Image (cartoon, rainbow, N blue to C red):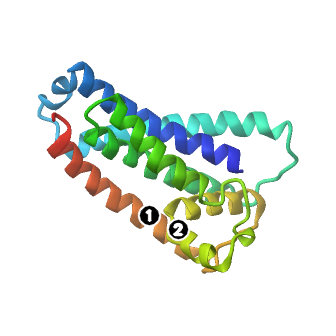
Amino acid sequence: SGIIMMAMLQNSYTNTQSTITTAKVLGFAIDVIIPPIPTRVLVFAFLIGGVARGLLVGLLSFTVLYFFANFSLHSVPLLILYAILACSVFSLIGVIFGALSKNFDSATSFNTYFINPITLLSGTFYSISFLSPFWQKVILFNPAFYLIDGFRYSLTGVTETPFSPIFPLMFCCLTVVILFFVACIAVKEKYLD
């Protein structure tokens, strides 16, 4: 489940961030902003593009891994929900960082110093029970942990979240809403910089 989720997160982020950064660097961002399209619609369009790419990569990864790994689906509705939430969170982060990037170097640094650490330090490829008690508590503040743990639960039925099953869903939904508003502000204020 970690490999599938990692591929989805990276592709969702990369789709939106590279689209926006390329438009800014090559100078055709103005063509996107000039039509009378509300900022929230523009952000939603970027979001849909990132989610679509992430889900497609996730489906392809799942299909390939299904032949090599012996696993069954614990909950298909939860699997779809967590996949959409995860792709949404990282697509919106990509929109924010794309809007804030001034060039390809700054875009790459966002990926190197923010995206990679929060995805790799979130229990993607290991159980958090291997961590010391201090780091087990720290990891609970990482939204990517809940996305990955929820996705893992929907595949295997095993969770590491010490809370009720509804808390991670609420936390992830709240994260999407907050990131959507932040993305709208970032696109409105910084997209043409």
Quarter of the picture containing the C terminus is top left
Instruction: Tell me the residue at 56%/52% (across/down).
Output: 119
Mark 2 lies on residue: 169
Q: Where is residue 135 in the image (x, y as percent from the top left)?
A: 61, 73
Up/down of 90 relative to 140, above or below: above
Q: Where is residue 125 in the image (x, y as percent from the top left)?
A: 71, 53
Few, some or many C-alpha atoms within 10 Å of disc 1 (few <14, some 14-19, many ≥20)? Answer: some
Q: Which amino acid does label 1 sit on?
A: Cys
Instruction: Tell me the residue at 70%/63% (across/down).
Output: 153
Helix, strand or loop under label 2: helix
Q: Position of residue 12 (x, y in %)?
A: 48, 40
Instruction: Tell me the residue at 74%/35% (across/down).
Output: 63
Q: In this view, does 156 lie to the left or right of 94?
A: right
Circles 2 and 1, Cβ within 8 Å, touching? The answer is yes
Q: Where is residue 36 in the image (x, y as percent from the top left)?
A: 11, 34
Q: Count up the numbered dots.
A: 2
Q: Which of 91 and 131 is in front in this view?
A: 131
Q: Quadrant of residue 159?
A: bottom right
Few, some or many C-alpha atoms within 10 Å of disc 2 (few <14, some 14-19, many ≥20)? Answer: some
Q: Quadrant of residue 78?
A: bottom right
Q: What residue type is labelled 2?
A: Leu
Up/down of 126 relative to 44, above or below: below
Q: Is residue 58 left or right of residue 142?
A: right
Q: Which of 117 and 157 is in front in this view?
A: 117
Q: Which of 99 and 74 is in front in this view?
A: 99
Helix, strand or loop under label 1: helix
Q: What number is the disc on residue 173?
A: 1
Up/down of 56 relative to 2, above or below: above
Q: Nearer the viewer, residue 22 or 159?
A: 22
Instruction: Tell me the residue at 20%/51% (across/down).
Output: 185
Q: In which quarter of the image is residue 64?
A: top right
- CA–CA distance in space, label 2 to label 1: 6 Å
